Amino acid sequence: MQLKEINKDIYDVDAWMDEEYGRVGSSEREEFRKEAYAYCVGQIICDARKQEKMTQSELAKKVGTNKTYISRIEKGVIEPGVGLFFRIIDALGLRIDIVKPIV
């Protein structure tokens, strides 16, 4: 589907998302959201690892897993459990802030 042009600079992304992945709240849209989230988390980890000039093998050794598992996380194929996620964050020198969202 093409994005519906509202005017020459604005497109209706919501309509496109609804058509491609179902309406918000649908199982299809939720599955897409989970996949997109896993991919984004993987990219953040990959970018941070590269910034630290660390190989996947080095990161895996630091956190107690193997290179293949780190690769699958970075590609967004799988999501690490909470414990491993925190070990990865720590090994990469990152910090997580837990805050209430502003609504």
Image (spheres, grey):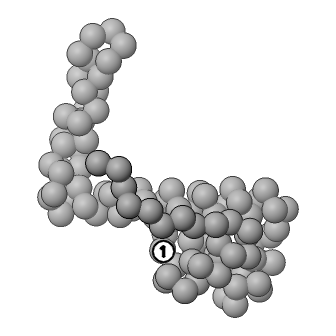
State whether residue 68 appears in this view: no
Where 101 falls versus 16 (above or below)?
Answer: below
At a point 23% along the width and 55% down the height, the residue shown is 29
At a point 26% along the width and 17% down the height, the residue shown is 5
Q: Nearer the viewer, residue 86 or 49?
A: 86
Furthest residue in direction bottom, as rendered = 64
Where residue 76 appears, as percent x and y from the top left, is 51, 65
Where residue 99 appears, as percent x and y from the top left, is 44, 62
- Give the side of residue 71 with respect to residue 27, left or right: right
Where 48 falls versus 2 (above or below)?
Answer: below
Q: Nearer the viewer, residue 21 or 50?
A: 50
Q: Secondary structure at mark 1?
A: loop
Where residue 72 appears, as percent x and y from the top left, is 57, 72
State whether residue 97 appears in this view: yes
- Give the side of residue 84 with respect to residue 48, left or right: left
- Which picture quadrant has residue 97? bottom right
Where residue 54 appears, as percent x and y from the top left, is 82, 68
- Which picture quadrant has residue 45? bottom right
At a point 28% along the width and 32% down the height, the residue shown is 13
Give the number of callouts.
Answer: 1
Q: Nearer the viewer, residue 82 or 55?
A: 82
Where 21 falls versus 98 (above or below)?
Answer: above
At a point 84% along the width and 62% down the height, the residue shown is 53
- Which picture quadrant has residue 58? bottom right
Furthest residue in direction top, as rendered = 8
Q: Amino acid at mark 1?
A: Glu
Q: Which residue is mark 1?
A: 79
- Give the side of residue 87 with respect to residue 26, left or right: right
Disc 1 packing (10 Å; few <14; some 14–19; many ≥20): many
